[in-house]
Image (spheres, rainbow, N blue to C red):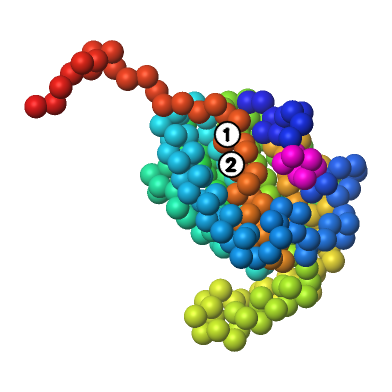
Amino acid sequence: MPSPFDNTPSPLLQRLRPWQPGGKNAALKDFDPGAKPFSLGDKTRDKAAVEDLAVELDGLQNLFYADKRYKLLVVLQGTDTSGKDGTIRGVFGRMSALGVHAVGWKAPTETERTHDYLWRIHQQVPQAGEITVFNRSHYEDVLVPVVNGWITPEQHQQRLAHINDFERMLSETGTIVLKFLLHIGFDEQRERLQERLDDPAKHWKFSMGDIEVRKQWAQYQNAYGTVLAATHTPWAPWTIVPANSKTHRNLMIATVLREVLQKLDLRYPAGDPALAGFTVK
């Protein structure tokens, strides 16, 4: 597959490049989680644009499903409360369930631990004509074990190389890989965690484990920086999405997704010539 973001100049790509990693490290402190680079000026207009994009994406996904020349893997990665579930609802919610598959990744099961760490991931990648959305992903295996010291620096580097090779193999066999890091601030996360505690309808989302992980905020920010720099590739690029604003988060991701799908020159398959002139009676 060609790179999802080619070198063709476009207004979208010009706005996108500042939000993609570069250099030996992609320090998240250099990216403002409260920024709104894709905003149309106010929340009302942005919400309307998200709705319009959702309708467009529904049509493009229907064509993508019928075309069946491509597969699309969308990775949503981010800290607790960064909005992965909300993105799935807001960006992919209007699409047909026949062609869209969401996978939420938790800690590996006992059976999964007996295999290599990418074994379970490979089983869930999209098939022809399908869009698969990962809520968390294989990148948990180069974040959690690193922050907690469960693997050595050498094993960390090996895993980063494995992931690049894995994603390159997916790309070379017809899968478009888009990766979004949903970037929120420390204070924004505190407010969202408190909201889960204050709202009985959201208690099920809260875990004391989230508080323990929050204590490791700085370590995770550093780990993300390493991951972003090491695995931002032409065949599987990262986009850092400032996500303090939920509306802007959805607007930015939906805009990028539309651009990528439109570039594919999707088409409906040719009909059976034997049906030409056939009349249903």
> 272 above or below 124?
above
> 93 above or below 57?
below
Front residue of 212 and 245: 245
The secondary structure type at the circle numbered 1 is helix
Tell me the residue at 62%/56% (across/down): 250
Label 2 crowd bin: few (<14), some (14–19), many (20+), radius 10 Å: some
Label 1 crowd bin: few (<14), some (14–19), many (20+), radius 10 Å: few
Labelled disc at residue 53: none
The reply to whether discs 1 and 2 touch (Cβ–Cβ < 8 Å) is: yes
Q: Which residue is mark 2?
A: 258
Where is residue 76? Give x, y as percent: 63, 52
> What is the magenta segment's predominant secondary structure?
helix
Q: CA distance from mark 1 to mark 2?
A: 6 Å
How many marks the image carries: the answer is: 2
Q: Which residues are magenta?
A: 11-17
Q: Is residue 29 left or right of residue 142?
A: right
Q: Which residue is mark 1?
A: 262
